[in-house]
Amino acid sequence: MAVRQAGNVEIIAFAGRIVSGDGAGAVREAIKGAVERGHRNILLDLGGVRTIDSMGLGEISAAYITVARLGGAMKLLNPQAKVSSLLQITHLYSVLVTFSDENAALASFD
């Protein structure tokens, strides 16, 4: 996981697997850390994520709700084919806005 800033957006890049156990917990901890640092606009870069399971999707969904309740926004960047497929199957694509271009994603927070 790597964290960086772009204006008023905290970008959190994940790699590998977001699955039950450490991977899903990493999402929870990353969002918790961003919120504790005062960030309300969060972009999750999933370009390096090869696999995600229901627990991982659950953590992303819970993070989305947490950020939204605080008046912020959380969006996804570069979900790979497997991740996009799961977002479609679970209908989370209708809630979680996704982008393939970082500049477009960042502009959407304005």
Image (cartoon, rainbow, N blue to C red):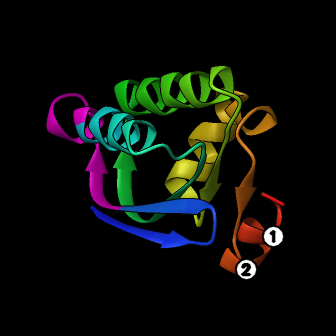
Q: Residue 42, percent across and down?
A: 57, 51
Q: In the rendered image, which quarter contains the C terminus? A: bottom right
The amino acid on which the numbered mark 1 sits, given as a three-letter code, is Ala
**C-beta proximity under 8 Å, tags 1 and 2:** yes
Q: CA distance from mark 1 to mark 2?
A: 6 Å
Give SS at disc 1: helix
Q: Quadrant of residue 78?
A: bottom right
Q: In the rendered image, which quarter contains the N terminus? A: bottom left
> Mark 2, residues whose alpha carbon is within 10 Å: few (<14), some, or many (≥20)?
few
Is 82 rendered above or below residue 78? above
Kindly identify which residue carries mark 2. 103
Front-most of 93 and 97? 97
Q: Quadrant of residue 2?
A: bottom left
Lateral position of residue 30 relative to residue 94, left or right: left
Q: Residue 91, percent across and down?
A: 73, 28
Kindly identify which residue carries mark 1. 107
